[in-house]
Image: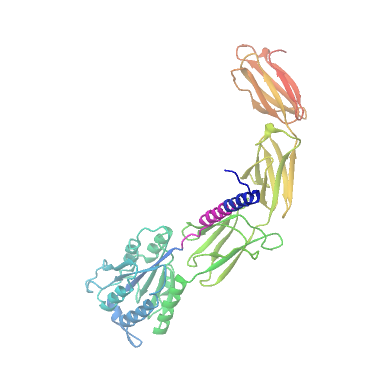
Amino acid sequence: MEFKNKTLYKGAISGIFILIIAFIFTGTLHAQKIQEKEKPKPLTRILFVFDASQSMYGRWQSDIKINIAQKLLSNLLDSLYKVDNLQLALRVYGHQKNFPPQDCDDTKLEVPFAPGNIKKIKHVLKSLVPKGTTPIAASLEKASSDFTPCDNCRNIIVLITDGLEECDGDPCAVSSALQKQGIILKPFIIGIGKDFQNAFNCVGTYYDASNEEAFSKALNIVISQALNSTTAQVNLLDDSKNPTETNVNMTFYDSFSGMVKYNFIHTFNSSGLPDTLYIDPLMTYNIVVHTIPPVQASIVQLTPGKHTIIPIDAPQGMLNLKISGSSSITKNLPCIIRQKGDMNTINVQSFNVTEKYITGNYDLEVLCLPRLKINDVEILQSHTTTVEIPSPGIAVIQKSTNGFGSLYILEDNQMRWIYNFRDTPTNSETIILQPGRYRAVFRSKFSDKSVYTIEKTFTIDSGSTSNVKLYEK
């Protein structure tokens, strides 16, 4: 088929080309959006551990404690009907067996976690009759199994009590163990009618409900802290205390359990400011910024519902390792980087590579033969420091047979060992060496007298090859 109208033909081809480009571009954007999809928000699970021991029959303010606690908690639950990404559960203690005698196993998960179970929790609350004792530690311990395994959940306990542990348990130890295992976040405790702060500070965050109004306020504060979004930004500061550093990973550790909670690659938003992070405010964090070497901020606390700015000093400059001339034989030559005066290795950097480091002074050890030590190299803010070493040469060690021998560099009329010869099938070795004067010392393994030792002194120049024959004196 022949196109008689060349203009129409060209227009058709152009249109097809544009469609193909548009398709590729749209597909690329779609793939990028899939790749950049945000992680789903965690499911918040709140377990109310409710005191229904005999003492809850006591008179308090306008009514008995159990009635006030039931009413105020039910009112709070009414406000949570339409909250997304939230599940609730109810564990009760002291409500199954009369006291006396004391039953320290009197604790039960009355309503397990499930979507839309607020009505069921309210019904159970209304039917509670105080009877028994106060096994707080046992209730917390058994609460650990109330939270079924979940990879993306925030597990929170709200303990409502009018008394202290009565069963010789240790609520502090139990709470600590559950937090360290990552089962729960730091619990909330609301003490009814009396200040139990000294006893419960080690268990979690304590709120004193000395009257009905304080109880209602405490409930609302706890739920607000558990649910409200909290934002933060990390300002990585340069030497001038300006937040200009970026593009480095930051790890947020729970300071109590030591567990990793978040990893973020630091970036700037469209306004040129450090990006906003959504962080759980119910933890205290140790933040490690993975610069070389790493820097950190300890015991960082966020204010629930507010934006927190976290400043961390992280001034950085660049180190460029260079070999003079063009030499492919040392393409991946490694160099150990240490902070000045410290023997701990913080990085192994290859030559012809540029890396970022925290500003300061460093000691370098180049893993060539012989090793080169370059001390007190200064890294300055936003500046590239270049360290250049000579291009090496090659020594071809030729032996009539394998044997015993070593290679030494000659410095100030002294011999410094750098290498032991290997047994090779060809009786030949090729060794890359820095420029300098060397001496090879060798004896064949078939020679039975030391007088047959052979010595050869030779020089290595940059880019040159020296043939060293160890079979003739």
Q: Residue at x 62, y 45 (%)?
A: 347
Quarter that holds the N terminus: top right
Quarter that holds the C terminus: top right
Q: In which quadrant of the rendered view does residue 207 lie?
A: bottom left
Residue 387: x %, y % from top left: 74, 43
Left or right of 298, for residue 65: left
Residue 245: x %, y % from top left: 66, 58
Tell which residue pokes out farthest to the front in this image.
4
Q: Is residue 264 in the magenta section?
A: no
Q: Nearer the viewer, residue 100 or 1?
A: 1
Residue 168 visible (yes or no):
no
What number of labels is visible?
Answer: 0
Query: Residue 182, relative to residue 123: is it above or below?
Result: above
Q: Residue at x 37, y 71 (%)?
A: 159
Tell which residue pokes out farthest to the bottom in this image.
62
Residue stretch in magenta = 21-40
Q: In which quadrant of the rendered view does residue 315 lie?
A: bottom right
The colour scheme of the drawn protein is: rainbow
Residue 158: x %, y % from top left: 39, 71
Q: Is residue 31 in the magenta section?
A: yes
Residue 295: x %, y % from top left: 61, 56
Q: Nearer the viewer, residue 403 or 330?
A: 330
Residue 164 visible (yes or no):
yes
Query: Residue 276, relative to residue 392: is it above or below?
Result: below
Q: In which quadrant of the rendered view does residue 375 lie?
A: top right
Magenta-drawn stretch, dominant element (helix, strand or loop): helix
Query: Residue 52, relative to residue 240: is it above or below?
Result: below
Left or right of 281, for residue 418: right
